[in-house]
Every structure is written in structure tokens, then in C-alpha cells.
Image: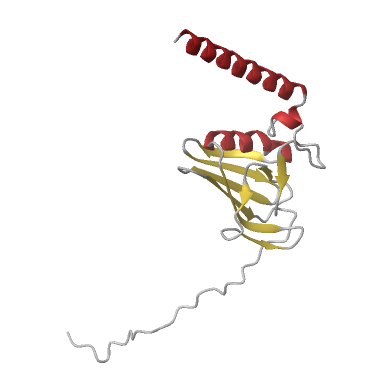
Amino acid sequence: MRFLKTYCAIILAASLCGCTMANSAADENPAEGNPSAEGAVVNGNGNAGIYYADFDDIPIPNEMSVDHNKSLVIGTLSRQTGVLVLTGRVNAQSLYRFYYDNMPKQGFMLRGFFKHAKSLVIFEKQGKDVIIYVDEGTIFTTVEIWVVLRSDINEAPLQSSIPKAVPQNTYSTSTANASY
């Protein structure tokens, strides 16, 4: 029995020592030990841990991936609109904080927000509004990024391709055959 207790104590000490050594190695080189650490993944803009998909001014954390089956982005190279749907195993509050902190760095101004398990953040920039909806599910968190183009003073107004409704006279207003 005494041998078993000693053996367990040695195993416990060795495992604690191994964890301490692994953590100190990760502190020395953050790119190897912690993929989400500052400097882990740096893109051309010098930002760590983010990438850009269809919208070149809306950052996406590396932990989230674009769901192409649920996304729809249309427009020209300079003006795009639509919805970009992201999924990943990330805490909803950290995603909310990510967009709350990073969108102003891209020139967006915060216009409003709702914050809890389902969060909504609204941003504005010249020519566009961005609505970011974060929904934490059981396994995955979903983010919907809605980009709506606006007509600002210096830009040509956006034209709708939907024709205006023309009322159809399908009923008769004639009182000639009316009997009271």
C-alpha cells in the first residue's frame, strides 16, 4: 500500500512538472504554444488571428469559418452587399467583444447593440451599415454579418430593379347594377 502511495505521488509530481515546462515553452514562443496568442497568425495588415473574406473592411477571427451555403454576397468589387454567415466553436461573448473592439479600427462607428447569449451590434461607415448578429448554440456559435449599402450625399442613389406596383382595378365601382 505504501508503494502505491509513493508511486502515485511521483506520477503526480512528474505530470505537474511537465505541465509547467509546457507552459513556459509556450510563453517563450507564443506562435507555437498558443495559436490565438498575439503574433500567432499575422496577415498583410499586421493583424494577428484574423482574416478577411468577401468584405475587405470586416475582420473575421481565425476560429470562425464562412458557411458558403448560407451566405449571399452580391455587387461589384468596390461595392458589395449581402449576408456572410460564419460558424465556429467560440464563446458568443468573446465574438461580441471582438467586433465591438475591432470594427472601429476599420473606420466603423458604433450605432447600437444588444448583448447576451444572442447579441446584435450595429455599425455605420460612409456608404454602408453593418449589422452583426451573434447566436451561441449548443455546439457551434453562428455569426451573421449583414452589410447594407446606403446612398450618401456624395454618391449616386441606389436604384431598385423591382418595378413599382401598379394598382389593378379588379373590382367594379359601378352602382348601375347595385340593388339596395
Quarter-wise, where is residue 36 in the image?
Answer: top right
In depth, the one of 170 and 119 nearer the eye is 119
Q: Does any portion of residue 38 appear in the rendered image?
A: no
Q: Percent position (x, y) of residue 44? A: 82, 42
Q: Percent position (x, y) of residue 15? A: 60, 19
Quarter-wise, where is residue 159 in the image?
Answer: bottom right
In depth, the one of 61 and 13 nearer the eye is 13
Query: Residue extending furthest bottom?
Result: 177
Left or right: residue 171 compared with residue 166: left
Q: Does any portion of residue 76 appear in the rendered image?
A: yes
In depth, the one of 31 and 168 nearer the eye is 31
Residue drawn 77% across the image and 26% down it: 29
In this rendering, the count of numbered labels is 0
Residue drawn 80% across the image and 37% down it: 46
Quarter-wise, where is residue 103 in the image?
Answer: top right
Q: Is residue 141 above or below residue 83?
A: above
Residue drawn 71% across the image and 53% down it: 153
Q: Is residue 129 above or below residue 33?
A: below
In depth, the one of 113 and 10 nearer the eye is 10
Q: Percent position (x, y) of residue 118? A: 47, 41
Where the N terminus falls, by quadrant? top left
Residue drawn 69% across the image and 30% down it: 34
Where the C terminus falls, by quadrant? bottom left
